[in-house]
Amino acid sequence: MLKKIINIIKPLLPKNRIMDEIKWRLKNKPVPPPHFIKQRIIRGYAKKFAIKEFVETGTYLGSTVEAVKNVFEEIYSVEIDRLLFKKARDRFANYQHIQILQGDSSKILPLILEKLNATTLFWLDGHYSGGDSSKGDQNTPILKELELILNHRIKNHIILIDDARCFTGKDDYPTLIKVQSFLKKIRPELIFQIRDDIIRIMP
Ligand SMILES: C[S@@+](CC[C@H](N)C(=O)[O-])C[C@H]1O[C@@H](n2cnc3c(N)ncnc32)[C@H](O)[C@@H]1O
């Protein structure tokens, strides 16, 4: 059965992705999953909840923006690093519905939130990740980002936080339990799940 499905979708996908996914599944889905799987998960939420607006913190080179650019009607992505910001801004300069913003996400998010008029899918991925990435006051501003989104006037946003495996209580990352109790304090009615290295918060 699996072989049949693979044969059907094979011509539709880049060759190496099929192999990467098969290997990942055969190894029992270790974290982190390949990037394209995370991007597919984001597109899946957009489709399932008919969401048209997307906000990402941590643009880096813009791979996630690229992967979702035809899915959303409005896309905002924030990058703290000036050089990475300029590269991404130039990359998407021809897309009217994509706005790449520069700054610390915890400071830029309020400006984006002001503009939102509908349920939005948030992809929170703005954290120091070595190499050419940068950081603000902390390695991750996740609790501030969450606080801002959870207190927004629109109450049914979907929030996906990448790299759940990093939430160990070290290097400025809260533990997963701390994120969950933070959520319970502000919006106890929301669902909190972790799957495939992604923390998922939704109504
Ligand atoms: C893991 S990368 C993001 C990858 C990107 N989301 C993707 O899917 O390709 C993290 C990025 O967040 C940026 N960053 C770190 N702290 C930030 C902050 N406080 N605000 C905005 N961006 C931040 C880093 O410079 C880096 O480019």
Image (cartoon, grey):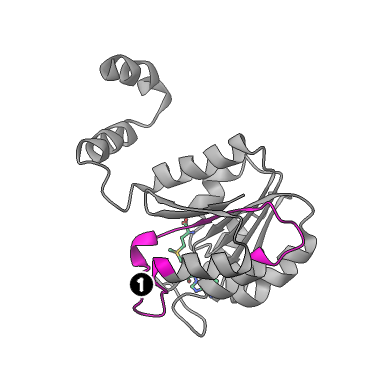
- Main secondary structure type of the part rendered in magenta: loop
- Residue 89 lies left or right of residue 41; in this view the side is right
Residue 116 seen from this side = yes
Query: Residue at the spot x=58%, y=75% of the render?
Result: 144
Q: Position of residue 76 (x, y in %)?
A: 66, 58
Query: Residue at the spot x=69%, y=67% of the render?
Result: 151
Question: Which secondary structure lies at badge 1?
Answer: loop
Specify the segment rendered in magenta: 150-177
Q: What amino acid type is highlighted by mark number 1? A: Gly
Circle 1 residue? 131
Does residue 158 belong to the magenta stretch? yes
Q: Position of residue 162 (x, y in %)?
A: 44, 58
- Which one is nearer the viewer's eye here, 61 or 117? 117
- Residue 117 lies left or right of residue 149; in this view the side is right
Q: Within the image, what quadrant is residue 89 found in?
A: bottom right
Residue 83 seen from this side = no
Q: On screen, 85 above or below 90?
A: below
| Identity of the residue furthest to the bottom in this view | 137
Query: Residue at the spot x=72%, y=64% of the render?
Result: 152
Q: Within the image, what quadrant is residue 15 found in?
A: top left
- Residue 201 lies left or right of residue 111; in this view the side is left
Q: On screen, 199 above or below 138?
A: above
Q: On screen, 148 above or below 75?
A: below
